[in-house]
Amino acid sequence: MNFVFWNIHKNKNTFLTIKELAITEDVDILMIAEYPECPVEELLKIINKEPSLYKYQYVPSNSPTDKVIIFTRFDTSFISNSNDKNRLSAKQLFSTLLNKNITLITCHLPSKINMTDDELSEYSTEVAEFIEEVEQQVGHQRTIICGDFNMNPFDKGMIKTKGMHAVMDKSVICNNRTATVRGEKYKFLYNPMWGFLGDTGKGKVSGTMYYNSSQSINFYWHIYDQVLIRPELIGYFDDSLLEIITCINQTQLITSNFVIDKQYSDHLPIKFNLKI
């Protein structure tokens, strides 16, 4: 099952590009953040126009604060709303291969422009509590969380035990299903997005967002858009199909200067696959 997440920066001009993305990447679950102020039918009309092989449907949300719009080429009866909280939404996605549900949690956390790193780190604790709450309610931990975290994989909120507790190496999780800190046990998430850091890392770019802050501490490339996976689903996750997409058909999303072409968005889409 192919998943794609893209923060399109409220740009309706990307709709035709999204159609190409859906076709070329054979997208099953399409997640869009910062959807523009227009009906979802406008995008559906474009992406379902021939030569589309599938007919996509909008997956309704129960929450007016849901920051990520979801479309699927499956019957929407396979996806049900579970829990919602400000900037967070959990859905149960039925896998015909597993004959079980998995939990898909989407998020778009506040921008670093509006929050300090410490404030975002504190926010991540609320996200972790939401994940635990959902898992207790549905009775399983087959969970993935995907979205724009507005944090890098190495930021405190992504790695601390009371935050996302997302590690870079799946062998850590395989050897230690939980971490014990001051007598408390904390579950892990696996974060494969670490692999893109640096120009010798995975893929063609070092991040999903490029920003030159002109400050003394300047990373330039940031990996704000990420997918995190509970240990129960790591065996179904295909590392080789994880990608930061830089080209859609003939459309280049990065310029000749090797930065993101903002005529489409200030973020690049990510794609991942689960064998479910």
Image (cartoon, rainbow, N blue to C red):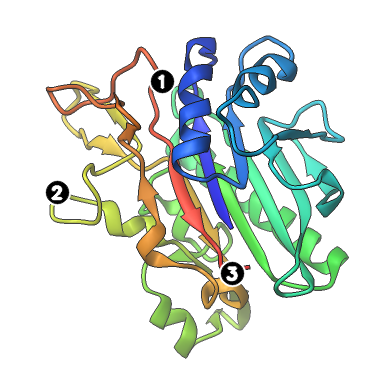
Whichever of labels 1 and 3 marks the residue nearer the N terminus, that label is 3
Q: Is residue 96 left or right of residue 265?
A: right
Q: Is residue 18 left or right of residue 67?
A: left
How much space separates mark 1 and mark 2, taking CA atoms? 22 Å
Q: Secondary structure at mark 2?
A: loop
Residue 96: x and y, percent?
Answer: 75, 68
Residue toward you, 182 or 151? 151
Residue toward you, 144 or 276? 276
Look at label 2 and name its amino acid.
Asp
Q: Secondary structure at mark 1?
A: loop
Q: On screen, 25 above or below 192?
A: above
Q: On screen, 184 above or below 163?
A: below
Residue 21: x and y, percent?
Answer: 47, 33
Q: Residues within 10 Å of mark 1 (few under 14, many from 20)?
A: some
Q: Residues within 10 Å of mark 2 (few under 14, many from 20)?
A: few
Q: Which residue is mark 1?
A: 265
Q: Which residue is mark 2?
A: 199
Look at label 1 and name its amino acid.
Ser
Look at label 3 and name its amino acid.
Arg
Tell which tag, 1 or 3, sits nearer the viewer: 1
Q: On screen, 10 above or below 112?
A: above
Q: On screen, 185 above or below 132?
A: below
Whichever of labels 1 and 2 marks the residue nearer the N terminus, that label is 2
Q: Is residue 88 left or right of residue 213?
A: right
How much space separates mark 1 and mark 3, taking CA atoms? 29 Å
Q: Residue at x 70, y 35 (%)?
A: 55
CB-based contact (under 8 Å), mark 1 and mark 3: no
Residue 40: x and y, percent?
Answer: 72, 20
Quarter of the rendering occupied by the N terminus: bottom right
Q: Is residue 155 left or right of residue 247?
A: right
